[in-house]
Amino acid sequence: MQTKQADYIVVGAGSAGCVLANRLSADPANRVVLLEAGGPDSNPWIHVPVGYFKTMHNPKTDWCYKSESDPGLNGRRLDWPRGKTLGGSSSINGLLYVRGQKEDYDRWAQMGNRGWGYDDVLPLFKRSETHEFGEGEHHGGDGELSVSLIRTKSDISEAFIEAAVEMGVPRTDDYNGEDQEGAGYFHQTARNGLRCSSARAFLNPAKTRSNLEVITHAHTECLLFDPSDPRRVTGVRYLQNGKPTEVHLTPGGEVILSAGAIGSPQILELSGIGRGDVLQKAGVDVRHDLPGVGENLQDHLQIRLVFEVNVQTMNDAINKFIPRMGIGLNYVLFRKGPMSLGASQVCIFAKSMDGLETPDIQFHFQPLSADKPGIEMHPFSGITSSVCQLRPESRGHIHIASPNATDYPKIVPNYLSAVADQLCAVRAIKFARAMTKTRALSRFILREHVPDNDPQTDDQLLQCARDISQTIYHPTSTCRMGQDKMAVVDDRLRVHGIAGLRVADASIMPDLVSGNTNAPTIMIGEKASDMILADRKALS
């Protein structure tokens, strides 16, 4: 069996993993190995902002997970795309740069996680970022991650923003600034018409370092342990081209799991770390009974309402040969036009009822419509008004069912199992429909296409949510940070009861942030790298 050696082994080259690989290898004295189960980010569609229509549901770039049948969705199973390439999900996502609310991070700190309040993490967001706004109180000006503003706009997008304003939502140019509440255009992780994934931003500049080795098509099987100390990690075993290979840690080294909210708990469980009953049922010997592994799963559930409108949308351009070719040529020649954008263009953070201190719902508006992302556009001029609850109370779980690393774990989201989530779903649909009755937007609306049965009562609206909702691709919290018995890592991201092992990705979030998860996950990579390097220095 082939073996390698490293000071740091990072498992997963996604949003956080690429940051860790960059920061940890900045010191030439540190030998870093980065393992990625997917391949290089060489598919050209990865780098085209709207290219995720081609990379989602593509097994070469997407894990193509599916959830289990969910009672909260009337028994439906949902596709759960996750990036399987350098950059991870940042290579196939919608490019939306959203940090969440400052209250999210202050709540993390109030739960006992020292150093994770908003004032602590804001400098890390800024360090990563080169924002088109430039250096300022809320944004960075010289980081690796390019964040740009949307320039291609349409009358229907403007009308959607004005409809929100009529509903009492203030207009904003920066929902990542002082106050999240508002309606405006998304900020996106793009530069010069190209996607700025975590791989492009953080990994590419570090690839030439002699002390960093990036290994693709490396499917992690399990962690390795010291025979004389069964709770000390000494390395990782992975499969590459069907051949088992091991990477061993140097004395004082660490393994950092950055395989995401699905992959990280799966690797822990395959290694005997997790709920004893789950491991025994799956045929894995229990090394360390840690009951929180795979539990506390949270996700944003989007309710996608579709309307036919009386003006041309992207449906018309994409469904017709000559306009479609024009869009392509505009992008190829000038890196401009619709292909230089993600599909979601307008962002609204709003309060679905009186008495709330912060927004509880978020809209993703798309000047196009389809049955789901990556599928052919509808044959009419359509728009999509997608609304999600920002802080769901429903909790699910992810667990292995076998000791085989190539078998997918069981994903059980338990959507809409909490009464508060059911009530918010009803309010969200009412809010979305009320927007279509405003002066600004009503003149464009011809009919409601989804839902197609005109639900009216609260019970009917809840059934509508159960029938049409989809994941918005934000799974978190399956290796939750904290000090209670269900926490998996401490506030320095060290796995409770295991030496030489940390987790640094969206799975460590104590609670789901109030917005998209890519930017916070990059921040987690920054925070983790600082703590790892500081702890090593303290021991030297």
Image: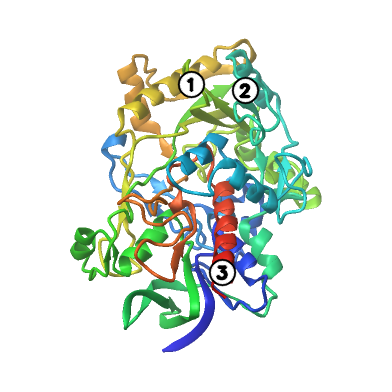
Query: Tag 2: Cα neighbours inside 10 Å, few (<14), some, or many (≥20)?
Result: many
- Return the disc, 3 or 2, that comes first in the chain's sequence: 2
Residue shown at 58% from the left, 41% from the top: 118
Query: Quick check: can you spot residue 173?
Result: yes
Residue under label 3: 538
Residue at the location (61% across, 61% down)? 19
Q: CA distance from mark 2 to mark 1?
A: 23 Å
Whether residue 101 is situated above or below residue 114 in the rendered picture: above
Q: Secondary structure under badge 1?
A: loop
Name the amino acid type tagged 1.
Answer: Leu
Label 3: few (<14), some or many (≥20) within 10 Å?
few
Callout 1 environment at 10 Å: few (<14), some (14 to 19), or many (20+)?
few
User: What percent of the width, then of the height, locates residue 61?
Assistant: 52, 60
Mark 2 = which residue? 160
- In the picture of the structure, the residue carrying the numbered disc 1 is 356
Q: Residue at x 40, y 48 (%)?
A: 79
